[in-house]
Image (cartoon, rainbow, N blue to C red):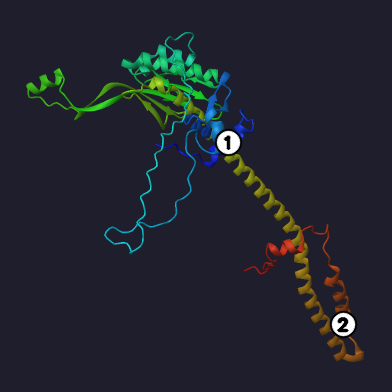
Amino acid sequence: MPPRPVNDAQREVLDWLAAGGSQDPLRPEMKLSAAALAARGLVKVRRPGGKWTAELTEAGRYYVEHGRYPGEPEKAERPSASRPRRAGRPARPGTPEPSPAPAEVREPVVVPREPQEQVPLRQVVRRPHPAVKELRDRPGRLPMPLRRRCVLVAHSLVTEALARGWTVTPVEARREPDGYRGTYLRYASQALLLLDAGHATVGLVFSEVTKRRPHEDTKEEAARRAKGQYVWAPRYDYVGDGRLRLHLTDRDGRKTGASWTDGARVKVEERLADVIAAVEAASERAARMEQERRRREEEERLRREEAHRVEQLRRGYEVWEQVLHAGADAWARHREMAAFVDEVERAIGEEGHPFVEWAHGHLDAVDPRRALPSGDVPTWTHEERARHGRYEPKSTYRW
């Protein structure tokens, strides 16, 4: 089977490593691409002292230089498009029959693969972390037939997590009254212990795989049936089959879907590197989500600031705009009243009337051309005001 091609994201990791990069990738997801390349033997990932580092292998350098795996033949040009003749149709006279092309014999492609980094299984629990000590001292939280395996797996994972600089938190219990003059142990989470690679807290839960079997009466149930008494019994029994299962959960103990179960050839103890990688991936995923959340919050903050700025500019502009609209209406009314007073004065002639003098004084006092707005000139441009909509004067009528 030919090796899988390298996608754009993985090619970016290869180019980054070829340019001299080894630590602190440009984006967190580049670590996932590096893990995929390590499975193909192109990249070697290490964590000395808990620090993530990566480097190209010989096969990786060959791929960067030639664009293909070592031993993989170059892509041949597409053969000429000459359709084979249909079977049963005779060739034209004088046309030579095409000779069949010799079958190309390809040698199997061998891609050198370097062994993946493994997490050693501790065979003895020395100086256990408080989280492991809590499990060891309270065996009721572990499947009893697999208790020793669970403690060793937990101790190995905790030791590796501490070597990487992660935070390990025990899930301790506290005694609470049970309502019957007694107490019981209540744990803060369904998880047995908590691992934090920097951005997300992940819990571990051990369980034994069970199989469903038809219920078989116990001795007491059989004795009661023999006496003709009513016996209630479940339809099925769920019996452990001796296989260990490890689940990853969130902080509260809700399962996240990642789990590892004993198989016919591979046990959970051999998948510890996958567990560590899953915890690290959960942390990177949480970091990306946190960055996305901060980006959205920043965009929302800028949007609110821009809306507030526009609102302040709108208010200052509309004060003068309202004066303009109201003044234009008042000026039209003022000219009508002035024309009316002139007509009255012309009608009464030289006799005159006190009303005419009073009307002229009133029109001079309420001249709208003198009612100008105060304050600073609006800084909002007319183009921005027109872009945000025209001013619509509100009705002053009240019912």
139 left or right, relative to 336: left
Q: Amino acid at mark 2?
A: Val
User: In the depicted view, which residue is nearer to us: 288 or 98?
Assistant: 98
Image quadrant holding the C terminus, namely bottom right
Question: Is residue 187 positioned above or below 379 on the image?
Answer: above
Residue 135 image point, x, y percent:
42, 15
Tell me, yes or no, if residue 240 can be seen here. yes
Give residue 12's position: percent from left, percent from top: 58, 38
Q: Is residue 366 visible?
A: no
Q: Is residue 262 left or right of residue 6?
A: left
Query: Residue 65 got which mark?
Result: 1
Give the quarter of the image for residue 324: bottom right
Name the N-terminal-most of marks 2 and 1. Answer: 1
The location of residue 150, given as percent across then percent down, is 39, 17
Residue plotted at (36% across, 54% down):
98
Judging depth in this view, the residue of 309 and 298 nearest the camera is 298
- SS at mark 2 in the image: helix
Identify the residue shown where x is 64% and y is 30%. 20
Q: Are marks 2 and 1 in contact (CB under 8 Å)?
A: no
The residue singled out by tag 2 in the image is 356
- Above-or-below relation of 68 to 205: below
| SS type, badge 1 | helix
Residue at the image position 28 percent from the left and 57 percent from the top: 87
